[in-house]
Amino acid sequence: MIRLAFFGVFAIAGLLAFGAFFLARGTGSNGTQAIAPAPTLQSVPEVEPVPDVLMYFLSDVDTASGTITIVLRDQLTGQGDMVVRDQAAIKAARTVAYINTTPSGGEVLGMVAMAMMGASPKETVLQIYRDDVLISAVECTSTTCGRFASDRDADLGPLLGAAQPLILEQSFAENYDDYLADLDAVTQSPDYMFLDLRPENAAPQVRQTARMDLFLPTLSVSAGTSIDPSVTSALARSIVNPLLPEGANINGVTFMGTGAGIVTDMDSGTQILAGGAQIAFPAVEFTNVKVSIEGASDFDDAALQTLTEQPLSQFDYAQPFADFVRDRLQSDCADCFAVKVNGDHYTMATVTVSEPEGYRLDYYDLRDPP
C-alpha cells in the first residue's frame, strides 16, 4: 500500500511540474521562444504505514462460562474444517492465538476485482460457539487470510494441535416421533452439535402430512351415457375407504374425462389415419378417477390388487368395435386394431404421486475419531 501511495504522489508531482513548464514557456518579442527556469521538485512526503491489526480472537471470550467450541475452517488449517473442544487448549490460546486481518494495497485491488466479478471478497475463517450458540467469528479478505492468501499471518497457538476433523452427519426420520427423538439427541448430548447447521426456522419442524394420488382403473361407458359425479364419488369412496392405512383419509375424488378413444394398430401401436387425421372410435367414452389421500403415501400390493378387481364401470365394447372395424375400416380383423385412450389409461389401481412424511436433520458428530 505504501509503495502504491508513493508512486501516486510522485506521478502527480511530475504532472504538475510538466504543466508548469509549458505555462511558463512563451514567445519573446523578437519571435524567439522564452524558456522559463525549470521548477524545483518538492520533496515527496513520507506516507505513514498502516499498522497491522492482529486479532487475538479469544482475548475477550469468557472461557469460564459454558463450553467453548472453536471451528477452524480449511482456509486456516489446510487440512479441511477442524473443531477444537479441548477447554485447556482454548484457555491457553487466549493470549497467543491471533489472525492478521489487515489487507495490503495489492490485496485491496484484488478485493475490488473479485467484487466486480460478483464474488464475495470476504470469508469466515473461524467461528467461536458457547454451548452450540455462535458468539464470535473472524472474517477477512480472501487474499489476506482466506483461500487465496499467499502469505497468511496467523498463529493458532495450541489450537491446531488439539483440533479434530469436523464430521458432518445426517439423520432421516420417516415419522414425527423418530424425528423428535433425533432432535433431542443432538440437543442434549455434548457429542453432537448443530453449529453453523442450526436450522434457520425454529425447531422442531412443523409436522408434515403424507399424501398420495391414487388412480382407479379407467372408467368406460357407452357414448352418450352420463356419469353422476355424486354417485360415482360415493362408490369410489366405499371401495377405497376399507383399504386405507391407519390414520389416512380421502381428501377428494376427481373425474377427468378423456373423451373417445383413438384407433391404433394392435402390433405397432401407431395411429390409424384417414386423410392424415386420427380415427376416433365414438361408441365408448373414457374417464379417469383420481382419489386424493392424506395421511399415507402408498398402498401395499394386496390392497392395489383388490382395488383393481373392483372397477367402477367397464363397458364391454368388443362387439361395437368389431362392427366399427368392419364398416369404417373395411376389415374383418377386429383383433388387428385397438382403441387407445386419448391420454392416460389405467388398467390397474395405480399410485401416481407419493409424498411420504420425512424429516432430515443435519448436524456434526464431535466425538473423538476411533
Image (cartoon, rainbow, N blue to C red):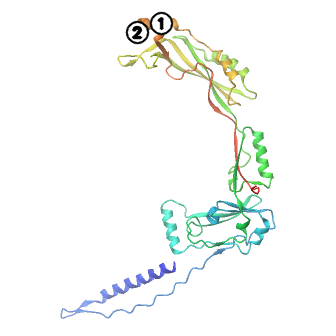
Q: Is residue 96 above or below residue 132?
A: below
Image coordinates of residue 117 in percent, x first then y, are 48, 60
Q: Earlier in the sequence, mark 1 or mark 2?
A: 1
Give the spatial CA distance, label 1 vs label 2.
10 Å
Using a 10 Å C-alpha cutoff, classify the residue at mark 1 as few (fewer than 14 neighbours), some (14 to 19) or many (20 or more): some
Mark 2, secondary structure of its residue: loop
Instruction: Determine the residue positioned at 49% across, 80% down.
Output: 3
Instruction: Determine the residue positioned at 55% across, 68% down.
Output: 143
Which amino acid type is marked by label 1? Ala
Instruction: Determine the residue positioned at 30% across, 93% down.
Output: 36
Which amino acid type is marked by label 2? Leu
Q: From where the camera sits, is residue 12 visible?
A: yes
Residue on which the image places disc 2? 329
Image coordinates of residue 152 in percent, x first then y, are 60, 71
Of 221 and 84, nearer the camera is: 84
Q: Is residue 211 above or below residue 124?
A: above
Of the 4 image quadrants, the one containing the C terminus is bottom right
Asked which quadrant contains residue 304, the reply is top right
Q: Which mark is residue 370?
A: none
Asked which quadrant contains residue 268, the reply is top left
Image coordinates of residue 368 in percent, x first then y, are 76, 57
Residue on which the image places disc 1? 322
Q: From where the camera sits, is residue 62 visible?
A: no
